[in-house]
Amino acid sequence: MDYSLKTSSQLRPILLGFRKAAGLTQADVAARLGVTQQTYAQLEANPAAVSVERLFKVLRVLDVDIALSRPTKDKAVAAPAPPPVAAKATPARKRASAAKKRENW
């Protein structure tokens, strides 16, 4: 069965469900990951706070695959409007814009 994830808050019940469906305890998963049960319990309680790499490791232990897909045409959202045309940037604006882009990475 496939499960759709739209928000990070949906991760916790999905991880919990996959772990229980696999017949594993938190201690079992923790042992397979090489961490303590308490560490895994914290991850399961707030999976949105962990790195993607750690989340992938947990999913591998639970034997869960991730598949990304686009919505079908029936569910597709209308294309967003194009952005407004920006005023010509001054050198100070260009520097601020470049600095802001670097901050976002």
Image (spheres, grey):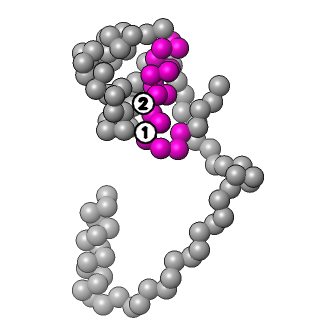
Which quarter of the image is occupied by the N terminus? top right
x 35%, y 88%: residue? 89
Quadrant housing residue 67: top right
Q: Which residue is mark 2?
A: 12
Q: Amino acid at mark 1?
A: Ser
Q: Which residue is mark 1?
A: 9
Q: Amino acid at mark 2?
A: Arg
User: Is 8 positioned to the left or the right of 91 in the image?
Assistant: right
Question: From mark 1 to mark 2, how far is it between C-alphas?
Answer: 7 Å
Residue 26, position as x, y percentages in the image = 35, 14
**Callout 1: SS:** helix
x 65%, y 59%: residue? 77
Asked whether the beta carbons under mark 1 and mark 2 sit within 8 Å of each other, the answer is yes
x 31%, y 58%: residue? 105
Prevailing SS of the magenta stretch: helix
Q: What are the residue bounds of the magenta stretch?
A: 5-22
**99 to 23, vertically: above or below:** below
